[in-house]
Amino acid sequence: VSKVRYSTSMSLDGFVAGRDQSLENPLGVGGHRLHEWMRALAVWRKEVGLQGGETNASTAVLEEEDTDVGAIIMGRNMFGGGIGPWGQDPWRGWWGDNPPFHLPVFVLTHHARVPLELQGGTSFTFVSDGIGAALELARDAANGSEVVVSGGGSVAKQYLAAGLLDEMVIHLVPVLLTDGVRLFDPLTTPEVRIEQVRVIEAPDVTHLTYRIVK
Amino acid sequence: VSKVRYSTSMSLDGFVAGRDQSLENPLGVGGHRLHEWMRALAVWRKEVGLQGGETNASTAVLEEEDTDVGAIIMGRNMFGGGIGPWGQDPWRGWWGDNPPFHLPVFVLTHHARVPLELQGGTSFTFVSDGIGAALELARDAANGSEVVVSGGGSVAKQYLAAGLLDEMVIHLVPVLLTDGVRLFDPLTTPEVRIEQVRVIEAPDVTHLTYRIVK
């Protein structure tokens, strides 16, 4: 059965997005600083059509994250639901006609709509009946490969709390955002046991892998 | 002039002590789990008079932390102020007659009292007129060696907010405490810039060193 992995950048003070997060600004104030380590990489820039960039210890981590992934689950914020003419023309999210996923993507949303088939193998399927249903669809699509839970912390928190996550990868960045959206907070963090599996030091980020003990 | 360093164990979800922290239970519920990596070490056990233990990648980190330290600043909780017959007999804190510090220790407290000179070179000086005054005393005592800010997060937060900290060492443990005392929270985390200086992977802990950019 597919392994379910969540991967996120997090500030040292625990935030996965800055304050005043909204559909228009899903990273929140200062949230772009969480992803600077990634935007510096040639491998990432090429994927989104940008030139230049560097190769460092993060390169292999990012490449590995894309290996043997069969499906992606994300929240509506990461899809970019708020910008387009929602419910009218088929808004295609943030990602343009050829999104960098090249996989079946399952978007958790309250608003059901027909699936989008885009170029390069990316499809967006909108799931409005819960995280369990989305995982079932993603597992079917992944066909034994990994299912990656992506995007805002709220989706990951739901999967973690439901005991459905096998692995968390935290890209810990040396930033104090001081406020914003926490990955872990007292109301939603479940009492699960985790084990440190791997640590990789890279420029301006530490890649931490944890296994969730069932 | 002395470098000022803060060193703490922190859970992946950002807590330096569990919930229901008190003078009687300064680590709070589950807070002992933050220090298990340290209690497993022969070098630490020997220091506090225990036998056995192991040697691993944390050993050098812990030994290095004790090198070239000239003075320690801690809060009243870490000294252990609440247990003894306060204001009567000279209560000596948690640490017994021969505390494992072997250095001048400056305890931030609201209750002034005469200093304690204990065995092995440890003295406790009680400072009731603020973190600046304590740092001045500690710098004088350290005479160019490092000043270490230790213990509960509230003391470190004050030094960080006042721009008096040069370096933070976070021993990040694979534990989700779900609630307790945060090192960083929106009301007290200053907008300071930090740089990742060093990362060391060890069993059940990752040692992260950050420099505070002035």
Image (cartoon, coloured by chain):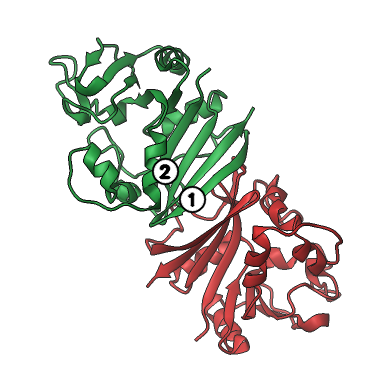
Chain colours: A green, B red
The answer to whether any part of residue A171 appears in the image is yes
Mark 2 secondary-structure assignment: helix
Q: Looking at the image, which residue is at 68% across and 51% down?
A: B21
Q: Chain of mark 1?
A: A
Q: Is residue B46 above or below residue A41?
A: below
Name the mark on residue A200.
1
The answer to whether any part of residue B109 appears in the image is no
Q: Total label count?
A: 2
Q: Chain of mark 2?
A: A
> Which one is in front, A207 or B175?
A207
Mark 1 secondary-structure assignment: strand
First in sequence, mark 1 or 2: give its number: 2
Q: Which kind of residue does numbered mark 1 sit on?
A: Ile
Q: Is residue A22 above or below residue B182?
A: above
Q: Which kind of residue does numbered mark 2 sit on?
A: Val
Give the quarter of the image for residue A137: top left
Measured from the top left, where is residue A29 in percent x and y? 29, 47
Q: Looking at the image, which residue is at 53% across and 33% down?
A: A167
Q: Which residue is mark 2?
A: A61
Q: Is there CB contact under 8 Å for labels 1 and 2?
A: yes
Measured from the top left, where is residue A169 in percent x and y? 48, 39
Other residues around mark 1 within 10 Å, as few (<14) / some (14–19) / many (≥20): some
Name the mark on residue B58.
none
Other residues around mark 2 within 10 Å, as few (<14) / some (14–19) / many (≥20): some
Give the quarter of the image for residue A121: top left
CA separation in Å, label 1 and label 2: 8 Å
Q: Looking at the image, which residue is at 52% across and 49% down?
A: A199
Q: Is residue A199 above or below residue B207?
A: above
Measured from the top left, where is residue A147 in percent x and y? 44, 24
> Which one is in front, A196 or B23?
A196
Measured from the top left, where is residue B25 in percent x and y? 74, 53
Q: Looking at the image, which residue is at 71% across and 58% down?
A: B38
